[in-house]
Image (tube, rainbow, N blue to C red):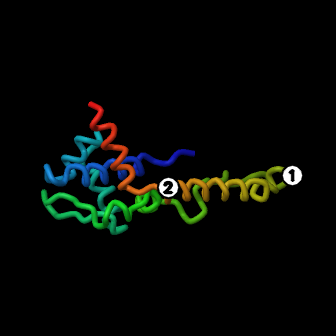
Amino acid sequence: MQISSRFTIAVHILVCIEGFKKENKVTSEFLASSVGVNPVVIRRVLQQLKKAEIVTVKRGSGGADLAKDPREITLLDVYNAVESVEEGQLFHFHEEPNPLCPVGRNIHRIMDGHIFAAQQALEAQLRAVTIEEVMQDAHKYINEV
């Protein structure tokens, strides 16, 4: 199980938007050069963030901006905006466990509670961190150079 790179790309985008907005027009091309992906990938993620009302995007080369204060955007908000995971479905079970096997027949009952707890822990951790806090971490590392 692995969360797609859309999540880390989205966080990277938000940090760049907030960090560079005073010096540069933050366009998909600008973001793509920082993230190291094609601008089309950036535009797709920006559209997901826009739909979740996390960013605003001006058409053409108008650039992007945060739609909310960075203290109001949690990593869980970003995760929910860009990852297509249904409620309670972070982990995916194999499709057809053998109903004749005692383990296969009971695997959901065996694992569901543990999986639910793991997903709740992940969501709680993501909910506890804001983009503002990520920005503070970014400033520490950026200023090291």
Q: Earlier in the sequence, mark 1 or mark 2?
A: 1
- Residue 129 appears left or right of 18: right
Q: Residue at x 50, y 55 (%)?
A: 126
Give the vertical position of 118 relative to 80 (above or below).
above
Local secondary structure at mark 1: helix
Q: CA distance from mark 1 to mark 2?
A: 36 Å
Q: Residues within 10 Å of mark 1 (few under 14, many from 20)?
A: few
Q: Which mark is residue 102?
A: 1
* The image quarter in which residue 141 lies: top left
Residue position for label 2: 126
Residue 92, image x, y percentages: 62, 54
Residue 77, image x, y percentages: 43, 62
Q: Residue at x 27, y 62 (%)?
A: 66
Q: Which mark is residue 10?
A: none
Amino acid type at circle 1 is Pro
Amino acid type at circle 2 is Leu
Q: Nearer the viewer, mark 1 or mark 2?
A: 2
- Residue 88 appears left or right of 5: right
Local secondary structure at mark 2: helix
Q: Nearer the viewer, residue 18 or 7?
A: 18
